[in-house]
Each structure stands twice: as structure tokens, then as C-alpha cells.
Image: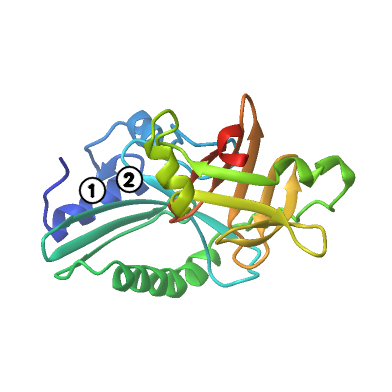
Amino acid sequence: NGLVSNARDMALFLSAHMNGGAVKQKRILKPATVLRMHTQQFTHAQGLPGHTYGFEEVPWVSHKGATVRYRTLRCSGSQLGFASRVVLVPSLRLGFFVGVNRNVEAGLRQVIDQFLHTLTPVLQKHRSAAKARKKPAKSSKAFQVMRFVGLYRRLGLPAHSPEKIAFLMNGLGTLTVRTNSSGKLYLQGVGELEPTEEGRFRSIKEGTPVAFRRGKYKEVTQSGCSAYRGCSSWTWFAT
């Protein structure tokens, strides 16, 4: 299932998304439809990127340490030998389509990043003010980082069958959260974390948002392209 189109029609479709559903004084989408398609419908935890109707939310920054963080909406498509991406930046009224005749994920990311690097500074000048990324809150005992330490398993892995033994023995689909020598949380594959608010952290190296929540089991959610977007700490796996 998906949308099959050409470059011209895709340009008109993206233009409609950036103009409340209208293209060249003709309406092809209702404003309420556009708004609903751009509104987050699912996320693993409040404050983290998730999914809208038809798009995945992907945060983007121009460079490490940048204060401005853009919310982009993306949709991907591919067939044997072909790949494409639709990228929207609603806050800048920017939308573009990238298509290549090779299914190469790394190449697509480079094209998208370079395009955003080139255009965002120009478009930013036309905004009245840029919303700066919130400064991380100072670490305190209130965060009680030790309560998040443990062994987690990826959501969806078997938990009530002999298969779980194989996953445990091979370390497949498991994720370790520990503290380092400075007492800060360290997430496997992400690195050292700094707190931003209760239960919310951000990786010091890349700025990747991470959320913890507690219920029957502890859970950790990592934003970004990772196999560990949603993980749960099950007592059986932690013993």
C-alpha cells in the first residue's frame, strides 16, 4: 500500500500540505485534514517523537550543539532498486521529495541532511523568532537515576516460551542501562544521558531524547532509528 505518483504531482501534494490544503487557489485537502495529518497520533511516551497519520516524526538539528530543533515529518517508500522520501518541515512551510534509482538508505539521508542544511538558514531569517531548545535541568536527587538501571528487553520479543532462553543467552534484543563513573545514566548504544525533566533524558553526544516510565515493569523509549525504540524491564530477564 502506498502512493504512486510523479515528481510534479508530488510537488503539488507537498505544496497543499504547506498551504492548508490549497494549491494554486484550488483546494485538494480540507484544512482540518492537513492539521490532523500533521498532529501526533502515537508516541511511546509524552514528549518524544512518534507518528502522525501517514508520517513519522523525526527531530532534526543543523549541527551538534545547535539550539534550534526542527520537527520534520517523513514518509518513505521503496521497491526493488528504487527508494524515495517525503520530508515536511511545518514550522518553515517547507516540503520536498527525494527519489533515487538505488535503494540506499545512507545516500538518502545524506541528500536530505544537505538539503536541510542549505535551506533552513535561509528560511529561518523569515521567521519572527526561533524557539530555542530547552536547557536541560540540573541533575538532582529527585531524578533518582538508580531506579532506571537494569536489563531491558525489546518489546515484542517472546517472554513466555522457551525462545526467551535463546534471546537471553545470545543477548539478542536486550539493552543495558547503567551508571558510569560520574553517576550519570549510560544507555547502551546511545551513551551518557543528561536529565531534562522527571523521567526524561537526552544523550549528551547526539541529543537523542530518551524517556523512562514505570508501571508493572520499567520501560525505556529511545527516539531515533534504532531497534530499541521501546524496551521493558522484565524481572525474569533481570535475574
Asked if the residue under mark 2 is in contact with the one under mark 1, i.e. CB atoms within 8 Å, the reply is: yes
Q: Quadrant of residue 157?
A: top left
x and y, in percent, of residue 163 in the image: 37, 38
The circle on residue 99 is none
x and y, in percent, of residue 40 in the image: 46, 36
x and y, in percent, of residue 218 in the image: 63, 34
The circle on residue 13 is 1
Q: Is residue 221 left or right of residue 109?
A: right
The N terminus lies in quadrant: top left
What SS does tag 2 mark? helix
The C terminus lies in quadrant: top right
Q: Is residue 206 left or right of residue 153?
A: right
Q: Residue furthest right?
A: 141
x and y, in percent, of residue 233 in the image: 59, 37
C-alpha gap between disc 1 and disc 2: 7 Å
Q: Is residue 220 left or right of residue 160?
A: right
Q: Residue at x 36, y 48 (%)?
A: 18
Q: Residue at x 64, y 40 (%)?
A: 212
**Relative to residue 39, is residue 112 depicted above or below?**
below
Under mark 1, the amino acid is: Phe
**Residue that badge 2 annotates:** 17
**Relative to residue 107, is residue 71 depicted above or below?**
above
Neighbours of disc 1 within 10 Å: few (<14), some (14-19), many (20+): some
What SS does tag 1 mark? helix
Foreground residue, 91 or 63? 63
Q: Is residue 38 something one can see in this rendering?
A: no
Foreground residue, 155 or 63? 155
Q: Is residue 190 something one can see in this rendering?
A: yes
Under mark 2, the amino acid is: His
Q: Is residue 2 left or right of residue 90?
A: left
Q: Quadrant of residue 104?
A: bottom left
Foreground residue, 115 or 226? 226
